[in-house]
Image (cartoon, rainbow, N blue to C red):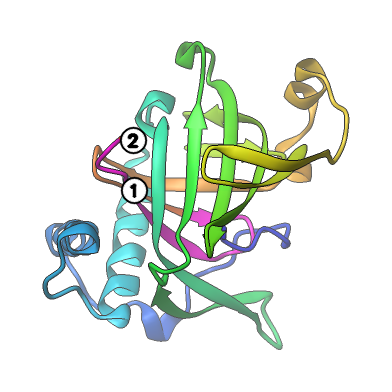
Amino acid sequence: MTVDSSSETTPSPMPEMTAEMTEDQAIATLFQAAATFWDGGDRPSAQALVAAMLAAETTARHQKTPLAFEHLLGQWRLCFTTATRKARRRGIRLGPGFYWPKFVPAQISFASADPATNQGTIANQVTLGGLWLRFTGPCRFQPKKNLLAFDFTEMGIGAGDRPLWQRSLREESAEAFAARAIAKLPFFSFFQATPHFLAARGRGGGLAIWVKRPDC
């Protein structure tokens, strides 16, 4: 449902996955993956898409262009994600990527009453057979690093627009969450945020692409 967030550091990409790709080729590949998710057609191979994500991430790291929190707001369907695996000598390494199956739709959403504060809420949901499982909680964005830290404080199960069961995972004030160090929170490090798709690396090292829901 999300990129793995169990590790404490962001690992280096796997060398064998970083195929040579220009910035323009990388962005074009990401746009193609987002477009074909809804419209069908020839989508990039998993290997090509991982290479494009790594190239785009490297470019973003060098350019250090800050993103705006408002560009993340809305509902986004998970399109593609990668696994991570432990390496013998050097932390966690990037595993193979795959397109998320459409018959198990997963989506992430961000909302904020005032995006200028860089604070809001996050919801992560997966649906199967008409039933959904949803985790929600606060989030905050750091534009200088393009990091979005979050914490899930509630979970629920429902069908359609009707919640069937809800549970609080922990009680925490907005002030307490704002004071918590990012080192103690899961986060996404975004390197692309367009009107059509988002791309990020999770704290655990996995990569993911979400595409904008056309009805949102």
| Circle 2 crowding by C-alpha within 10 Å: few under 14, some 14–19, many from 20 | some
Determine whether the residue tagged by mark 1 lies in a helix, strand or loop: helix
- Whether residue 145 appears in this view of the structure is no
The N terminus - image quarter: bottom right
Q: Residue 128, image x and y in percent?
A: 54, 64
Q: Amino acid at mark 2?
A: Thr
Which residue in the structure is indicated by mark 1? Answer: 60
- Mark 2–mark 1 Cα distance, whole angstroms, equals 7 Å
Quarter of the image with the C terminus is top left
Q: Are marks 2 and 1 in contact (CB under 8 Å)?
A: yes
Q: Residue 155's image quarter? A: top right
Residue 30, how many percent across, how many down? 23, 60
Frontmost residue, 56 versus 31: 31
Please tell me the numbered disc located at residue 65. 2
> Which of the pair 77/196 is nearer the observer?
77
Please say whether residue 57 is one of the residues in the magenta stretch: no
**Disc 2 or 1, which lies upstream in sequence?**
1
Q: Which residue shows up at 43% across the image and 81% down it? A: 15
From where the camera sits, is residue 34 visible?
yes
- Name above or below for residue 95 compared with residue 199: below
Is residue 123 found left or right of 198 in the rendered image?
Answer: right
User: Magenta span covers which residues?
Assistant: 201-215
Residue found at x 73% / y 22%: 178
